[in-house]
Image (tube, grey):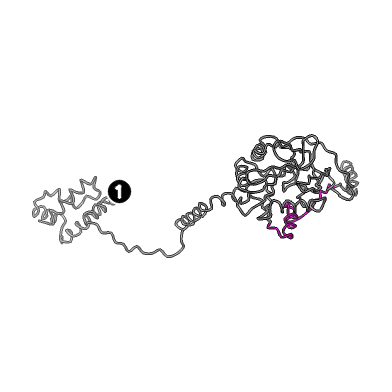
Amino acid sequence: MKWFLSIVLLFFPGCGQKEEGRKIDEIPMGYVGKARVNPYLAAEMYLDQQGWNVESSRMSSSYDDETQMIILPGSFLQTKGMAIQVLDWVNQGGNLVITIEGGEPDRNDFTESGSGMGASEPGDYAGLDHVLEQLRISLSYYSYQAADDDSKKRGHLSRPWELVKTKEECGGHSLEFEGEVGLTIKKGRNCIESENGKSRMVGMNYGAGEVLVLAHARPFRNPYLARADHAEFLDYLSEVYGSSGKIVFLYGSSNSFFGLVWKKGWMVVIAGLILLVAWLWMRIPRFGPILRDNSVKRQPYGESLITSARFLWRTGELEHLMRPLRAQLKRENQGDPASFYDRLAEESGLPRDDVVEAFTVESPKDPGHILKMARKLQTLFKR
């Protein structure tokens, strides 16, 4: 009883105590819907309102003559084959804008986390490495003085950033850049004044087209389009690089496997589906009346007897072949079986024992034995 009271006294104070509220860290998600998936939706809608032919896609673009400018993150070029394909398109007159970091769709602009992937290590993105090697552009650490900003007004968008101005031949726009990626080009143009040769934006001619490389995608992303001269800079790029064709924003991280299969081998896919449907039509049972087989296969009478004899031999019922002959001969007997056997032996010339054996043996030993019995019965018929 004492133990019971002790447990009750310990239990009831705990029941009456109010649970303290726990602090929950809320992470702002920012945009919802398409804007949450597509970081360039605002830029796409803005250019569309300005009358430009613009679209966005998560998968690889159709590098054709209709597309004049493509803006994509560097992480999109994951393989060397993708890089060769896009450089061939640039060589034929296309204009390519690459952002080294901050262009990925899964990056949240409304948090204080890192601004991008940073300067990638060699081998992380083979396609990006190939493009930078062909353009003779190198990535390095970039030290900058963050711009002054009122964090209370900007919220999470006040992540450290630098305000720079492009050269007049590159538009003369004020742009915001994040991160610590610096660009150095050996043969090309540096679009931003720099003392140590490290820049935030470089470009060069490549064949009949041009390539522009930005250290960060901040000027194109949804929350920042209305800041600085980002909208004007986007207008400038559209007039210079996309005035006579389509502008495409690629915001995926790689090609979709199924999208690539459909794009490159749609005829094989359709043929495979047709074969699959035909195979299923042949294999799936059809629930309906079974049609009668009207085809008649004829064979010689001798073969039918041989087939029947083989079946009766396997089933151990071979004596059924002699029963009709015995029954027909017995119908001639109207008296004593013993006198009947004597009369058949006298008329046929067979020994009486053979006549008795032909009528009395029920289970032949082998096919040879049944053959002898059949010959004896035939002799009796011919007597």
Q: Which of the two residues, 374 or 337, is positioned nearer the viewer here? A: 374
Q: Position of residue 286 (x, y in %)?
A: 46, 61
Quadrant of the frame with the N terminus: top right
Q: Is residue 67 left or right of residue 111?
A: left
Q: Is residue 207 left or right of residue 197?
A: left
Outermost front residue: 169
Q: Position of residue 160 (x, y in %)?
A: 84, 42
Q: Is 205 part of what is drawn in magenta?
A: no
Report if residue 193 is visible in the image: yes
Chain part drawn in magenta: 24-53
Looking at the image, which residue is at 68% across and 44% down? 211
Type of the residue with mark 1 = Arg
Q: Which of the two residues, 223 or 342, is positioned nearer the viewer here? A: 223
Q: Position of residue 181 (x, y in %)?
A: 76, 38
Quadrant of the frame with the C terminus: bottom left
* Vertical position of residue 116 compared to residue 282: above or below: above
Q: Is 47 part of what is drawn in magenta?
A: yes
* Vertical position of residue 194 compared to residue 232: above or below: above
Q: What is the total number of numbered labels drawn onto the structure image? A: 1
Q: Which of the two residues, 245 or 373, is positioned nearer the viewer here? A: 245
Q: Secondary structure at mark 1?
A: helix
The residue labelled by disc 1 is: 314
Q: Position of residue 347 (x, y in %)?
A: 8, 55
Report if residue 29 is visible in the image: no
Q: Is residue 149 left or right of residue 323?
A: right
**Category of crowding for the residue at label 1, using alpha-carbon neighbours closer than 10 angstroms: few (below 14), some (14–19), many (at least 20):** few
Q: Using the rendered view, name the quadrant where residue 45 is placed.
A: bottom right
Q: Is residue 324 left or right of residue 37?
A: left
